Image: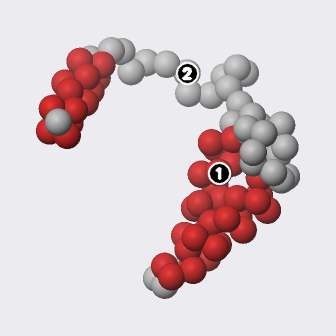
Amino acid sequence: MCQAFFILQIVCFVLYARISKKFDLFTFYIFFTDDSVMMIAIGKALLDVGKDYSNLSKRAVYNMQKIGRRYPDCGYGSNFY
């Protein structure tokens, strides 16, 4: 089952890769979302722990809450806080 799904992903990628790659990356219609904020929080957690990943989950939660609370209107679900 996993192999079939993997092959399907590759086929879709190859088909969609032929679509034109000419587009504006930055426009007035883009904005960051809760996913953007959480990605930054996870990246910061990875930088904070260095090579010792034993504390990664605690740092990730801490950074997600600390950074996420600065941007309350990014589309978080009601269970975030």
Between tags 2 and 1, which lies in front?
1
Q: What element carries label 2?
A: loop
| The N terminus - image quarter | top left
| Mark 1, residue position | 38
Residue that numbered label 2 is attached to:
24
What residue type is disc 2 on? Asp
- The reply to whether residue 21 is in sight is yes
Estimate the spatial distance between the alpha carbons at disc 2 and disc 1, rounded to whole Å: 24 Å
Q: Please give left or right for residue 48 compared with residue 13 in the image.
A: right
On screen, residue 48 versus residue 73, left or right, reads left
Name the residue located 67 percent from the left edge and 65 percent from the top edge: 61
Q: Pointer 2: residues within 10 angstroms few (<14), some, or many (20+)?
A: few
Dividing the picture into quarters, in which one does residue 5 lie? Answer: top left
Residue 47, relative to residue 20: is it above or below? below
- Is residue 47 visible in the rendered structure shown here? no
Q: Residue at x 78, y 39 (%)?
A: 78
Q: Which of 21 and 65 is in front in this view?
A: 65
Q: Is residue 48 above or below residue 16?
A: below
